[in-house]
Image (cartoon, helix red, strand yellow):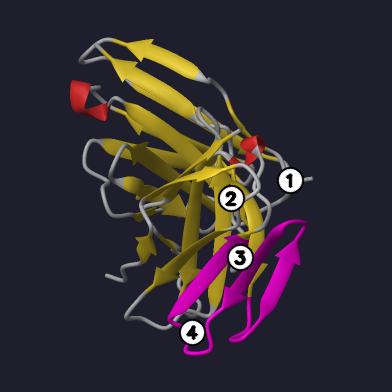
Amino acid sequence: GQQLNQSPQSMFIQEGEDVSMNCTSSSIFNTWLWYKQDPGEGPVLLIALYKAGELTSNGRLTAQFGITRKDSFLNISASIPSDVGIYFCAGQIGSNYKLTFGKGTLLTVNP
Amino acid sequence: DVKVTQSSRYLVKRTGEKVFLECVQDMDHENMFWYRQDPGLGLRLIYFSYDVKMKEKGDIPEGYSVSREKKERFSLILESASTNQTSMYLCASRKRGWKLFFGSGTQLSVL
């Protein structure tokens, strides 16, 4: 099956720093989604990307759909303590009903 | 806003018990999914349903069954709970091919 490699696995940063994480695959996707999960909660959708090259922002978050359609990245600018959590990428191929998820990036922000 | 509601946040059951996890969505979504989430393993798909009375096995269906008698409700059944089914269970739903929305999760402990 398809696999997504998400990196880094974890990050420990200072408040105010920018953060970057990415997902890569050997497969082509036609949709990329980025989620954030707070401890003990379900993942919440942050950004959805539908076109190669698309760059989309949601507040301090920016995500891009890679031009090869095999990767995506998420940037968080000027991090704050409430950015703490696990960030997941997910990709979908064609009309396949299943999404493929990365294993997540655990972000810790030191005030 | 889309609402995906899981009936219990925390459940404690004994080995061998039959366990029902219920999920309800209020947005007339065709597709519904059950995942389990374990540390280091990410999100793994147990079963999904692309419409009423339809179901398909995901990546780890062993020990589970599902029921989708009404469009808004998708139930996950553990016929005989075992300790290795202790996990966080996440329900999700979406309009066909669109963004996936998650519930808050059920943390199940099997003793």
**Mark 3 surroundings within 10 Å by alpha-carbon count, few (fewer than 14), some (14 through 19), many (20 or more):** some
Estimate the x, y position of residue A95 in percent, counting from the top left. Answer: 50, 77
Task: First in sequence, mark 1 or 3: give its number.
Answer: 1
The quarter of the displayed image where residue A51 is located: bottom right
Report, in whole angstroms, how far the alpha carbon at label 2 lies from the one at label 3: 9 Å
The answer to whether residue A108 is left or right of residue A76 is: left
Disc assigned to residue B2: 1
Task: Give how far across and how far down residue B2 sits, in percent.
Answer: 73, 45
Q: The disc labelled 4 sits on which kind of residue? A: Arg
Question: How far apart are the two marked residues, 1 and 3, measured between alpha carbons?
Answer: 14 Å
> Could you say which disc has been placed on residue B93 in the image?
2
Q: Can residue B21 be seen in the rendering of this structure?
A: yes
| x 45%, y 63%: residue | A99
Label 1: state its secondary structure.
loop
Q: Chain of mark 3?
A: B
Residues indicated by labels 1 and 4 sit on the same polypeptide chain: no
Q: Residues within 10 Å of mark 2 (few under 14, many from 20)?
A: many
Any mark on residue B96, and which? Answer: 3
Observer-side mark, 4 or 3, equals 4
Q: Is residue B19 above or below residue A71?
A: above
Q: CA distance from mark 1 to mark 2?
A: 9 Å
At 27% across and 46% down in the image, what residue appears? Answer: B61
The residue carrying mark 4 is A69
Residue B10: % across, % down: 47, 16
Q: Give, as a single range, the part of the protein colored magenta.
A: A50-75
The x and y percentages for residue B7 are 57, 23
